[in-house]
Image (cartoon, rainbow, N blue to C red):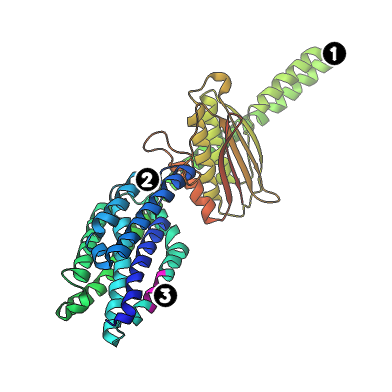
Amino acid sequence: MNLQYQYLVEWTTALAMFAVIIVFLILFEPRWPPKVYACSLVPFLALWFGGNLYIMIAYGIEVQGNYTLLTATLPSLLYFWIAAKHRGGRFFFTFCLVDTAVIWMMMATNLIDYAVGGEGLVIFVLRVAALPVMIYVGWRFVRRPYLLLLRTVSRGWWLFAAMTGLFYVTLTIMSAIPTNLRQRPEDMPAAVMMLILLPLTYATIFIVLLQQDELFHARERQHTFEIQSAMMEQRVGELRDAEDRYRCERHDMRHRLLAIAAMLQQNDTKAALDYIGVSEQALAATAVERYCANPALDAVLSSYIRQAQELGIQVETQINLPAELPVPAVEVSTVFANALENMIHAVRDLPAEKRRITCKCMGSPCLMLEFSNPCGEDVRFGQDGLPVPRSAGHGIGTRSIAAFAEKYQAVCSFRVENGWFKLRLAL
């Protein structure tokens, strides 16, 4: 390599370390609140980056490269493991994925420079161009789907983490041990094959993860469909029973009218009025309360409100929704089902006077929903703004609501106001 460009090439290593951290932060979810996370992240990065930069300047890039495991990899691994929301295989896969992606880029630019006889200049130009592109692509295209995969896919991560770990070790050894790859032309064919194999393997991994994610959502949709079908059948049964009662009342109405006429002929007004009151109560018993014009949503509301009332929960509703909604009724009813189920679960064990839930909805000028219930204890919120589940297995409903809001670009908020937990959604 031309000594004129070697100095610039060495500094691209510092840029690569910076890019590794930035890309990793793009794909990383902390478990701490934002302020706590920021207060720990900033000093850590200052020490981590400053220390490695000092070693490069004082002792040279080769010395820093020989000790990069101790000075860069292990400290960052330990810190982010402590701060990570998703640990286990998910964490190690993300950690190794970012490292191998940057190492892959550095090896590829090194081989391209060697092939064209660039003597270092091509390496510098390609790396300076590639690193910002990697950061942009990570933020613009990879972050959102990858974080969704971390949240929804729970199986297979350790296997994928083992694969990325082996790639990381192999690329590290192949690129710099015992000497720089440019000084070992006999190893270049194997390096090229490794560079081809790596993206193919990662593509296969992501296809498998996406298939698992789709399977998860398919099962969730199937489960929702089964619940809603049961609710619709129950609602149809209620309407059928009400229709039978109304038919009987209509049949008996002629006899009641004759009885009332006879009482009036005998000037027994009080008996006639009492009889009318009894008849009115019997007729009112045939009515079935409807909460909205949309059948699917009405069935969900009816089912959960009945559950709440059976548990002694006072339910307040202000619902003004049209039959046709701006989004599929099945998905909206899923939001209602999750919100109502969460509220019922939250207040069922409270004292009787605090067992209250409210549901306010309107369809104009836009679809706006508000669900609220008293808080029995402090509610903590995560980095994503969602309530932190108090135990494993909970929190699925809120994630489903958040996924609905993200899908349809709705404004969604979870907050506590004056002792009431409130969910608001506007579409």
Q: Amino acid at mark 3?
A: Ala
Secondary structure at numbered mark 1: loop
Q: Is residue 322 visible?
A: yes
Q: Amino acid at mark 2?
A: Ala
Q: Which residue is mark 1?
A: 267
Decide which of tag 2 and tag 3 comes sooner along the chain: 2
- The foreground one among 269 and 40 is 40
Q: Which residue is mark 2?
A: 83
Left or right of 293? Residue 390 is left
**Residue marked by disc 3:** 129
Tag 1: amino acid: Asn
Residue 126 painted magenta: yes
Instruction: Check residue 179 for magenta coloring.
Output: no
Residue 392 location (% of width, % of height):
36, 37
Q: Is residue 308 left or right of residue 176?
A: right
Q: Secondary structure at mark 3?
A: helix
Q: Looking at the picture, how far across and down is residue 50, in whole percent?
A: 37, 57
Q: Which residue corresponds to the image point at 65% horizontal and 45% vertical from the top-left?
A: 321
Q: Quadrant of the N terminus?
A: bottom left
- Tell me the magenta residue range: 125-131
Residue 167's place in the image compared with 90, above or below, is below
Quarter-wise, where is residue 114 in the image?
A: bottom left
Report crowding for label 3: few under 14, some 14 to 19, many 20 or more residues within 10 A (C-alpha): few
